[in-house]
Image: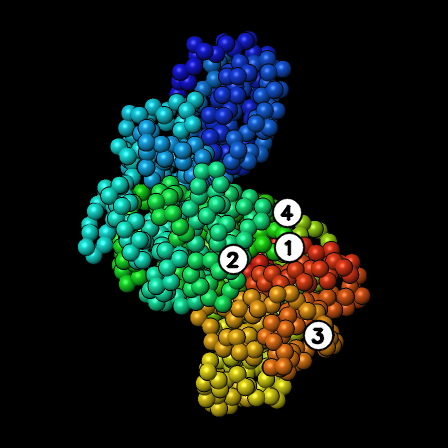
Amino acid sequence: MYSSGLENHIVQPQTATSARKIILSGKVQGVGFRPFVFGLAKQQKLTGWVKNCMGTVEIFIQGSANNLDIFLVQLLNNKPPLSEPCIESNKSVDIQLFSDFNILNSEISKNSIISVPEDLFLCKKCLEEMNDPSNRRYLYPFINCTQCGPRYTLIKNLPYDRPNTSMAEFELCDACKSEYENPNDRRFHAEPVACEKCGPSLSFISAEINCKHNTLQSLDNSLNILEQGKTLAVKGIGGYHLMCDATNSTAIHRLRHNKKRPHKPLAIMFPVTDGDEFLIADQFVSLSNDDRAFLKQPSRPILLVNIKQRTVLSDLLAPGLDQIGIMLPYSPLHHLLLNKFNRPLVATSANLSGEPVLTNNSQVEQRLTHVADAFLHHNREIVRPADDPVYRTIANKPRPVRVGRGVSPVELTLPFELDQPVLALGAQMKNTITIAWGNRAVMSPHIGEMTAVRSLQVFESTIKDLQQLYNVNIQHIICDAHPGYTSSRWARKQNYPVDTVFHHHAHASTAYYESETSEDMMVFTWDGTGLGEDGTLWGGETFLGKPGHWKRVASMRPFNLPGGDKAGREPWRSAAAICWQTGREVNVLNNKTISIDTSLIKQAWKKNINSPQSTSVGRLFDAAAALCNIKAQASYEGQAAMQLETLCEIADPSLELPLMRIDGIYETDWEPLIDMLQDSSSSINQRAALFHGSLALTILHQAIAIRDEYSIDKVSFSGGVFQNKILTECALNLLEKNGFKVTLAKDIPMNDAGISFGQVIEFAHKQ
């Protein structure tokens, strides 16, 4: 029990006439909620106590009925800015003998409604203190308070108290302890609280320098490395970043070459200045007021924005694209580096391609010694990785591409009650996992591609970790219907009942949940590939109904993909597929971009050897990029489609594709696209506009045919193809002009990162 130290300054409480027991769930831990309750109770001359209980906050409060009413109103209206309390119960109870109001020690309860706090940015007050030479935390890169700092990435167990975090090993000095134990201090129970005397420190390691536990010297050494155009691995809140000068093409070329990441876009971080956080960013990128507000939210996400022409930003940051991911510094260390460097830095995840971000000091040196010239470590353990979240603005709202630090774990309320806790394993690409129990679901941060050994390790640790954090023991597993997925093979080795969900049913169910409807709707699920009910690779499907009862009502003309999965990184294969399927030859193969002898491949294709049938719109985008001579071979998934979109200033829906009814399914024939895409009398920009417009028009025509037959006018989209801003916005406008009601995802990624949550929705309704 902690004393407030204010007893002599507060009017003594009056005789209690009423008492209440209140339980609050939601975001009430790690956000200064107990000190807020303490101050409010003192202000209203009330007695009792407040305490943490495994994710919830419990309050016993008593006093005059009028003051209690005021307390209850202000409890929600004047809450701490980062909190999101939800009253679970508010009951009248018997009055007890209390002469004061106190904050009690945390309590472990099996029945608590647990909510895990996310990692937070550096607040304005702490930033001012860090830059104040007279402050004892001047230039200290681990400054924090109840309104900022790491949470999820350092919690080992709940309740969220210092002994249950990776800060437990740092014993508080007298000054920090005084702040930590004072309910009237903004660092009261700020669990990561520390200073240079008692907290974590920085170390700098390079081939020439071994500077351990010397924070200021390590910062100077790091800035020297960056000024020399070299690459620095920087340990942050949820993992390491690889950082270098974003205006130095030589430095970026070395980073790309050493990381074997030749083209995939690199995120950048901008310094902020007093009075105008975007003064420097405005020189390089185009930002709307909505962009600025979004970038400043507590999670400090990455947002894809348009690059200004003729800036000093390197063209190597996002080759062939007109948008780049930017973010503001969110940790004290970021601010210190960027304030001194005073220009944007590349801040890309420190990992090997497709793997989760690295978090361990020795491991990052071992695995990235060929990539980074130096390492800026700290000695605070990152308990679990959390990559940066990524968003793209589509239809005037930022939509999640990847969930991560500051956003996840994503806690969602289900519109039903589960009979038993379940674990959904997600997809092969962009993997996340979801645990669900009762009416709650929790989706993990981005894990990665399940082809990597380390991804499987993080996948397994995340499954164990989320169960421990939320005090849940799963009893059932849900996985993708594709038997070859890593997660599907893993599921079959576990000692739990296993159910499978088809890939595109999961996509449709995620979209249905986000639409907040209880009526039947149609969902377009366009992506790369996923196993369909008929054993072929789907990717251009339209479903009708609701979770557990999806009916496939429309699709695209199927084609056979030579080489199967190889087509995802070799767009020429998709071009060959649609050309061969229609009796044409592939002109794209013998030019300066690529020269391949396809005779053996075509023979195998004719015999259906390693050439699975597909309806994938994602592969159609690849084919279009190859036929336009934009990209015949890709170094990352989606590269061809992204470059094709960049060349499309606006969609032109003037090319109508035939729509037929085949075996009860509406099927669109893409064949007219082939000659158009190879027509050199039109510019590539015009061809890209016609391609995007024809697919948007396809959505409209399919939707009209379905509405005419089934009288359904509600529409949604899901699948990675709909991260294409041009296509999605054009289709949305066409549909709305024709009387359709359209919803888009807002909290869950439309790509495969949303599959695990969709599996939960689909499974529950099938039961």
Residue beneath label 1, please? 395
Q: Secondary structure at mark 3?
A: loop
Which of pointers 2 and 1 lies earlier in the amino acid sequence?
2
Q: Position of residue 708 (x, y in %)?
A: 80, 66
Instruction: For the residues labelled 1 and 3, say whether their Cβ atoms are less than 8 Å apart.
Output: no
Using the numbered discs, state the Cα–Cα distance from disc 2 to disc 4 in whole angstroms. Answer: 44 Å
- Residue at the (43%, 9%) spot, across then down: 8
| Residues at marks 2 and 1, CA–CA distance in whole angstroms | 21 Å
The residue under label 3 is 655
Label 4: which residue?
Answer: 415
The residue type indicated by label 4 comes to Pro
In the depicted view, which residue is nearer to us: 284 or 53?
284
Q: Residue furthest front?
A: 310
Residue type (three-letter) at the residue carrying disc 1: Ala
Amino acid of disc 2: Lys
Q: What separation in Å lies between label 3 and label 4 (alpha carbons)?
A: 41 Å
